[in-house]
Amino acid sequence: MLIVGEIINTSRRRIAAAVEKQDAAFIGQVAKDQADAGADFIDVNAGTFVDRETEYLCWLVKTVQDAVDLPLCLDSPSPAALSAAVKLHRGEPMINSISLEKDRFDAMLPIVTAQPCRIVALCMTETAMPVTVEERVQAAGELIKRLTAEGVALENIYVDPLVQPVSVDTRMGNAVLDAIKTIMNDFPGVNTICGLSNISFGLPVRRLINSTFLTLCMLQGLSAAILDPTDKRLMENLLSSRMILGKDEYCGDFIDAYQKGIIIKDLN
Amino acid sequence: MSYQTLLDAVIKGDIKAAIEETLKAIDAGQNAQDILDQGLIEAMNVVGDKFSKGAIFVPQMLRSAKTMQECVEALKPHFQENAMTTKGNIVLGTVKGDLHDIGKNLVGMMLEGAGFNIIDLGVGVAPEVFVDKIKEANADVLGMSALLSTTMPSMSLTIKALTDSGLRDTVKVIIGGAPVTRKYAEDIGADSYASDAGSAVLEAKKLLNIT
């Protein structure tokens, strides 16, 4: 299970304030906290600063990679911001994201094929958010076909089935869960990724919902998640789910986390 | 006549009980507009207020809105030919290049619940489409939504298109969406910013001086 730490996003008030003040120490610490908690990639997103997104995203790339020795998930709908950020990035980044919307696909393609990288591919149809399982699987198939035709390795594609809130439509949970299973089944070797928190929009006790949803996604074969790795309850759940699903040899990671005090003994 | 039982049924989202109460009020000789204003819309005011305060959640709000819609359908045949009065016409849409509709739909539902007439243009709406519809519907308010930093500038372009076509002074503009801020609304010359469906109703009322 690949973990992308989601905290460095300027839609969070404290992150936005730190970015505006160019507070490298604060951002560096948030990056370190996520790395220590087990993140494999650190997401950076400066999307709320419309006019200065490129400048701030580039600053984040530099600042975070000065603080931690991890690759980043460069998170923006803007081709201009991404193409500048990619150039500053050390190692192979994850680029978030490309979709079938025509303008976006055409603009993003040269950026994601310019160097080896992992690519988050959103299951949007060309004109709408997906509703059904079939729409998601069809969009995934089309994205995989077009990206691999451009020489992208299948295992570098991370299909995002697009999580939508169950508060608005109680079928939204199953739509994503079934899509993950079908995509992993129909395109062996491809990866799937989800942002968890959309599932719980509009509801109370969101952490519990996100955590339960993660387990269900993992059961369907989800290979990566964008989440808050400093959320202890979530990470405990991830470790035990992974073990139960037979992906933790000799239960080693779970026991290790317990012995290091990462998993708390008594949950009462 | 007190509409307390009807209010309670709409707030609870009990469709069957709410329709029964609506028809009972009609049978008792109540005016359809009064049932709408003092029963249904008043109930949705309470729902919006509770939602803004975090006392109820999205599914409960949706359920109440659905209940109100069903009651309005039941009321419709009982309006005289001058039809029901609305609080104003609101054109709504997600801007060009942006396909996100969940937040915009919630806003539309709550505005409808508050007694506004909603013209929802859907997603990916270009500035000239907004302008044409505002002219055609004689809209009092334009509500624009954007969920992507790359599509937010389309809000600014739409406001400019309104100015160019001489409509800017005839319509109030409210904007919202995850990356949108109050400051951005001020920067691009929108009249207001709404952070959620409940506050969109309050802002619309404030701009149109509706108490």
Image: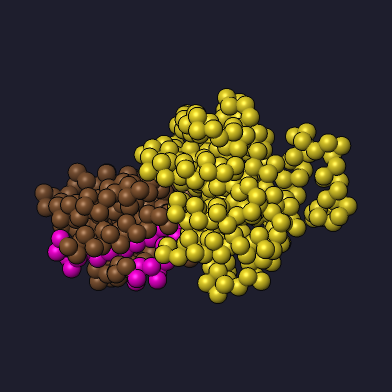
Q: Is residue A234 left or right of residue B59?
A: right
Magenta span covers which residues?
B165-187
A79 or B199, nearer to the observer = A79
A18 relative to A264, above or below: below
On the question of residue B85 being in view, the answer is no
Q: Residue furthest left?
A: B81
Chain A is shown in which shade?
A: yellow
Residue A22 placement (x, y as % from top left): 57, 72
On the question of residue B149 being in view, the answer is yes
Position of the N terminus of chain A, as image quadrant, is: top right
B5 or A96, nearer to the observer = A96
The number of discs equals 0
Name the residue rendered at 22%, 50% in the picture: B129
Position of the C terminus of chain A, as image quadrant, is: bottom right
Residue B102 placement (x, y as % from top left): 41, 49
Rendered brown, the chain in question is B
Q: Residue furthest top?
A: A186
Name the residue rendered at 42%, 45% in the picture: A107
Name the residue rendered at 75%, 49% in the picture: A236
Q: Residue furthest right?
A: A259
Displayed quadrant of residue B204: bottom left
B64 relative to B155, above or below: above
Displayed quadrant of residue A43: bottom right
Residue A155 placement (x, y as % from top left): 62, 34
Residue B68 in magenta stretch: no
